[in-house]
Image: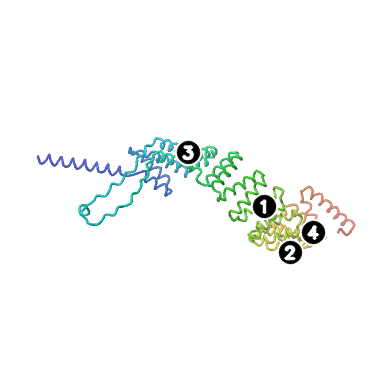
């Protein structure tokens, strides 16, 4: 009898142990773990946890399951899978049964407190929020549609992205950035008018947001609607301090629209606000050059080169064209690009008539491979010709292949032959 009791006890212990183990396994919430993995950026692990949740045969919230998969696929740039998951999340949310939250039980009044003489202070009655499952469903579906719009946009399904934003209801109109997204979708779908309209609607809802005006400015400029673009740009600059690049963009747009004087005014203002912006000086210099003001251009180029040495070549070249060769040579001496420096130095020496110095650059021209350029070879040959080193001049002239330069070289070679035959001065 005792043996049977002991056997039953062992069996009971084993059953209870297995039940406890099974209970422990059921307490693992794979959905929660998947969420943690997602926010830690461990997307593959999160997908594994979601699969375990699906395989666990426990009751899971399918709306959250599909939504989490959609978010993970979106992060992994698997946009088609993301779209599919979000669609399933919407269906699951539509079919979901919402249960009201569990109410807290009132605290028990212990015996000693019941007979206490201390006057009980009545707590204020807090009005409980009304449980509205349909509102919860609507909010959740709208939020999923926001995610769905992002997936569609990334997948370049731009009109579907707009439809998802529309389906998001109030949430799809909750921020200015969603209107810029909507406008960009229309723009990329080649519905330009709808894009402008989206920005206008957004600006009415968010009058203090400057990004909508900024985007409108670029759209108008691309459509060559210059006056509208100028108005948008000025409105934008009133709301937020513009940077140098935005002034440059506005000036370029004005110049493209034939408003050169207005473009110069914008850049002159930018020059005062951003005195260390090389690009402002250089662009302003180009615009003054269009007005045939080369000396102003040269000065602006030089000022720009103080902040960006890459513009030294342009500055030196402008001074060379203006005949200010000594200053051009000074700026050229500060250039770091050896090839460009040598090429420009040849042009400056020609302007100064210092042909011996050009010949002195022979080794540098050869070292940098510049004699492959027929213009450089012709310049060197001409320098030899001018110093009456006819053999060296002719040796270089024979190697010229460019048709136009070949004709010039032929003339010089004929002069050289005359000089040799008649012992005449050739210069």
- On-image quarter of the N terminus: top left
User: What secondary structure is found at the residue carrying circle 3?
Assistant: helix
Q: Nearer the viewer, residue 393 or 143?
A: 143
As drawn, the label of residue 141 is: none
Left or right: 128 as drawn, with respect to 310: left
Q: Are marks 1 and 3 in contact (CB under 8 Å)?
A: no
Label 3 close to label 2 by CB (< 8 Å) = no
Q: Is residue 362 visible?
A: no
Look at discs 1 and 3 and give the one toward the viewer: 1
Q: CA distance from mark 1 to mark 2?
A: 30 Å
Which residue position holds label 4?
Answer: 384
Q: Earlier in the sequence, mark 4 or mark 1?
A: 1
Q: Badge 2 is on which residue?
A: 327
Residue 419 visible in the snapshot: yes
Q: Residue at x 41, y 42 (%)?
A: 47
| Residue 4 locus on image (x, y percent) | 12, 39
Left or right: 34, with 215 as reference point: left
Q: Nearer the viewer, mark 3 or mark 2?
A: 3
Q: Is residue 360 left or right of residue 193?
A: right
- Foreground disc of the pair 3, 4: 3
Q: CA distance from mark 4 to mark 1?
A: 47 Å
Q: Secondary structure at mark 4?
A: helix
- Dot 1 corresponds to which residue? 251
Find numbered disc 1 in the image and state the secondary structure of the residue it sits on. helix
- Could you say where residue 156 lies in the image, as x and y percent from the top left? 54, 40
Label 3 sits on residue: 83
- Label 2's element? helix
């Amino acid at each position: 009898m005792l043996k049977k009791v002991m056997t039953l006890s062992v069996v009971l212990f084993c059953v209870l142990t297995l039940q406890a183990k099974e209970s422990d396994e059921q307490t693992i919430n794979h959905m929660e773990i998947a969420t943690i993995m997602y926010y830690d950026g461990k997307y593959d692990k999160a997908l594994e946890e979601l699969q375990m949740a699906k395989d666990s045969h426990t009751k899971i919230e399918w709306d959250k399951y599909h939504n989490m998969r959609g978010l993970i696929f979106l992060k992994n740039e698997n946009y088609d899978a993301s779209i599919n998951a979000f669609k399933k999340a919407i269906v699951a949310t539509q079919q979901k049964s919402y249960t009201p939250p569990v109410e807290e039980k009132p605290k028990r009044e212990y015996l000693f407190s019941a007979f206490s003489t201390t006057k009980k202070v009545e707590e204020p009655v807090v009005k409980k929020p009304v449980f509205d499952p349909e509102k919860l469903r609507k909010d959740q579906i709208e939020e999923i549609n926001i995610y769905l719009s992002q997936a569609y946009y990334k997948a370049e399904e731009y009109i579907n992205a707009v439809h998802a934003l529309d389906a998001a209801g109030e949430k799809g109109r909750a921020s200015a950035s969603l209107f810029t997204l909507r406008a960009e979708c229309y723009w990329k779908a080649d519905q330009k008018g709808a894009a402008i309209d989206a920005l206008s609607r957004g600006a009415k809802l968010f009058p203090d947001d400057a990004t909508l005006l900024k985007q409108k400015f670029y759209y108008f400029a691309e459509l060559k609607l210059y006056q509208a673009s100028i108005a948008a740009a000025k409105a934008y600059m009133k709301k937020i301090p513009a940077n140098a690049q935005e002034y440059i963009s506005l000036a370029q747009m004005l110049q493209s629209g034939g408003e050169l004087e207005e473009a110069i005014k914008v850049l002159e203002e930018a020059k005062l606000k951003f005195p260390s912006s090389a690009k402002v000086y250089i662009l302003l210099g180009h615009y003054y050059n269009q007005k045939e003001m080369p000396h102003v251009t040269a000065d602006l180029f030089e000022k720009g080169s103080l902040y960006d040495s890459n513009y030294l070549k342009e500055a030196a070249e402008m001074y060379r064209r203006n005949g200010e060769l000594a200053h051009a040579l000074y700026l050229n001496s500060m250039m770091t690009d050896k090839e460009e420096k040598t090429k420009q130095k040849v042009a400056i020496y020609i302007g100064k008539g210092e042909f011996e110095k050009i010949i002195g650059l022979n080794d540098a021209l050869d070292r940098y491979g510049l004699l492959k350029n027929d213009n450089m070879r012709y310049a060197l040959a001409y320098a030899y010709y001018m110093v009456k080193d006819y053999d060296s001049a002719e040796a270089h002239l024979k190697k010229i292949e460019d048709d136009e330069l070949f004709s010039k070289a032929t003339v010089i070679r004929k002069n050289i032959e005359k000089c040799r035959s008649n012992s005449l001065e050739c210069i």
